[in-house]
Amino acid sequence: MDKQQFFNGAVFDAWRWFGAHLGGGGAVFRTFAPNASRITLTGAMNGWTETDLHQDGRSGFWEVSVPGTQAGQLYKYRIYAADGSVTEHCDPYGFAMELRPACCSIVTDLEEYRFTDDAWMQARSADPDAPLNIYEMHLGSWQRNSEDANGWFTYEQLADRLIPYLLDGGYTHVEFLPLSEHPFDGSWGYQNTGFFAPTARYGSPAQLKQLIDRLHNAGFGAIMDFVPVHFAVDSYGLAKFDGTPLYEYPNDAVGVSEWGSYNFNHSRREVRCFLQSAANYWLEEFHFDGLRMDAVSRLIYWQGDEKRGINGDTLDFLKGMNRGLKARHPSALLIAEDSTAYPGVTRPLDEGGLGFDYKWDLGWMHDTLEFCQTQPDLRPHSRGKLLWSMHYFANERYLLPLSHDEVVHGKASIVQKMWGADEKDKYAQARTMYLYMFAHPGKKLNFMGNELGQLYEWNEAGTLDGALAERPFHLFFHSLCRTYRDNPALHCDYAPDSFSWADSRADVPSLIGMVRRGHGETLLALCNFGSDPAVYDGPLGDTPSLLLHTDLIEFGGDTEEGELNTELPLILPPYSGMLLRIE
């Protein structure tokens, strides 16, 4: 590693030098702690005694070679601060850690697993006209393992169960909530201590690589949530690593986040190298196909507050990281979870943008769910909530999310959010809302359980109700996903002529019509959000064919196959939708 480039903030592969690296009959351990007075290594390789690391002058770079070190051995650093205090820390660049509450780092051979996904990696593309339907999931609560004390399956066991499910469901990608090591289950992985260590909850780094390899060989992309804004406050982690605020701000007013974690000090070039190397590490070493960047608003504005103004240092860091990642992995997807109206999030960096491939459309999400929570007789007055998104949609490349954040903390599950007390009506409205979502321009993301039509919130300590997989709503959702995958007009999201509102009768305000065009195909989606039947008598083409009807009996509705009609006027039952190919 070029140490001057490290101090300049230009390094993207710092893990290749820092951390514990096997070779020559032992291992070399390196860390960065410019304000420490002494650092020792303690672990299985020295009988848990103390072996001193040596500093290169006063550079802050410390290292020691320990003969006989083997993969799998535990270790920690003891950091002696200038004030005489001593704190044990895990390795900031450690490649594996013990299962919480234990916190030692583990010597790891990153070459243990060999990927077999060359064909996938060579063919991988970030083409915005390709289908992108993401299944977002929390690995620990997707399914429960009765043979494990914590109820977890390993990465390898999950592959056996997940891949057939994705195949049946018609998804294109799976997105994992953060898999970096974290001490508190209830943080869902968003408060990390091991930014280079896959969580031990589900197995080893080699097992995670195998999971991704198998996903690729089955035709699925893998995306991971990445947390570049803050980290866990646990004393064995990054907090006051060398006895001083090395990774965090020295002032608690800006150093402590709203989640009670420590904010990274992105103005420090060494911190930039740490984070952008971590992002590159997951793409390079684990072959992830993309990163969903968490809390991007906090990288644009001071603590995410637009009124406090742009944070120039964090914004510069974000631009530099995205530029470096795209240069190294042009086909990987960079996705921004950003709730602000900051312009150009998905514009190329050379054109003044931030260089993301996609941005979550949180405005669409809130407007759509608020509309569906409105009682039907008032929905005509709220129709603009469903129309407004297309006033700004051309500004960015948007992704439409119904994510984990929308089904926790008293917000209710997606189906339960629908208006009314009658379960049948709630499911009918949810089916129509989902047709609206998949016909609307933008890539798609749904959190696990949404596809099952759960009526209760997600809980990371619980699991999904597998019995719901046999219910009609699940059949509908997976039919919708496959319809999306198989019809290319639904993938052409960002061309000016790919979308238009369909002509419909002004006296039927609860009927929403959308025309989608692309790749020689034209589709018409009609969604009746009213409690009464709706009539569509607008253009339909000469030979329309029905692709999907949300009110079929097999989906939980009331319409039989023999009752389907593709001639004008089309009559849509209450809370129902239709998707037709008209060219």
Image (spheres, rainbow, N blue to C red):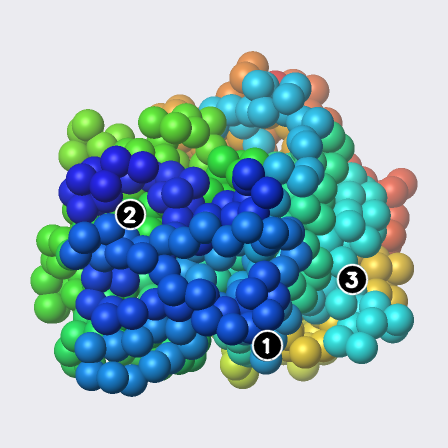
- Report if residue 179 is visible in the image: no
First in sequence, mark 1 or 3: give its number: 1
Compare marks 2 and 3 and give the one earlier in the sequence: 3
Amino acid type at circle 3 is: Phe
Quarter of the N terminus within the rendering: top left
Residue found at x 34% / y 27%: 327
Mark in front: 2 vs 3: 2
Residue 303 or 522: which is nearer the viewer? 303
Q: Which residue is mark 3?
A: 153
Identify which residue is drawn at 70% across, 68% down. 141
From the viewer's perspective, is the residue at label 1 or at label 3 nearer?
A: 1
Residue 210 place in picture, x, y as percent? 71, 42
Q: For mark 2, what is the residue? A: 273
Q: Earlier in the sequence, mark 1 or mark 2?
A: 1
Q: Quadrant of the C terminus?
A: top right
Q: Residue at x 29, y 70 (%)?
A: 38
Q: In the rendered structure, are the residues bearing label 2 and label 3 in contact, judged by CB atoms less than 8 Å apart?
A: no
- Asked if disc 1 and disc 3 are in contact, CB closer than 8 Å, the reply is no
- The image position of residue 393, as x and y in percent, is 34, 42
Place of residue 408 in the rendered image (x, y in percent of width and height, measured from the top left) = 55, 76
- Give the amino acid type for the residue marked by disc 1 in the picture: Ala
10 Å crowding of disc 1: few (<14), some (14-19), many (20+): few
Q: Secondary structure at mark 3?
A: loop
Give the quadrant of residue 308: bottom left
The image position of residue 133, as x and y in percent, is: 60, 42
Quadrant in the rendering for residue 398: top left
The label on residue 102 is 1
- Residue placed most toward the observer, 276 or 370: 276
Residue in the foreground of this view, choosing between 46 and 328? 46
Badge nearest the viewer, 1 or 2? 1
Q: Callout 2: helix, strand or loop?
A: helix
